[in-house]
Image: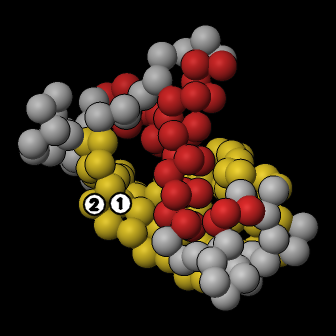
Amino acid sequence: MRFQGKAHVRWDDLDAFGHVNNATYLTYAQEARSDFFWFSRVREGLTPILSDMVVGRTEVDYLIPIFEGSFDLEVIIWVTKIGTASFALEYEMLSKNGLHARVKTVQVAVTDAKDKSRPLTQAERVFLSQYLEEPV
């Protein structure tokens, strides 16, 4: 199973070259990830999950530049690995023009003080397992 989210491409996301700046793709990933773990669950009457995590690693493959703003980019997310205290996510960012980027992140669950990692709970593992697929 894959989570289907969205991220809004704003006109001010375009840089001096007339396309969406590379760093902005990480903002799109963050917005879709927040929806995946928090906002979509609240809309369904469920408790948010994994709100205490940080990004440990990111990787982006830029495929088709985005030359326009003011539309919703489709962001598909799935899990590719579940470890003791971390898990890997992959994302595809699409529009009517095609696949714009593939993103990979490693998320690390952290303590309430946010100063060190902690093991994933059984409930978190069950949730993540629903979206587990082999890496692309």
| Residue 41 in picture, x, y percent from top left | 58, 24
Label 2 secondary element:
strand
The amino acid on which the numbered mark 1 sits, given as a three-letter code, is Val
CB under 8 Å between discs 2 and 1: yes
Q: Which residue does the image show at 82% across and 56% down from the upper left?
A: 71
Q: Which residue is mark 1?
A: 106
In front of the other: 26 or 88 = 26
Q: Nearer the viewer, residue 96 or 4?
A: 96
Which label was assigned to residue 56?
A: 2
Q: Dot 2: within a 10 Å radius of its alpha carbon, few (fewer than 14), some, or many (20 or more) residues? A: few
* Farthest-out residue, bottom: 17
Q: Residue furthest right?
A: 96
Residue 84 in view in this figure: yes
* Vertical placement of residue 127 versus 76, above or below: above
Left or right: 83 in relation to 21: left
Q: 10 Å neighbourhood of mark 1: few (<14), some, or many (≥20)?
A: many
Report the side of 26 relative to 118 (left or right): right
User: How far apart, in angstroms, are the residues tagged by discs 2 and 1?
Assistant: 5 Å
Q: Quadrant of the C terminus?
A: bottom right
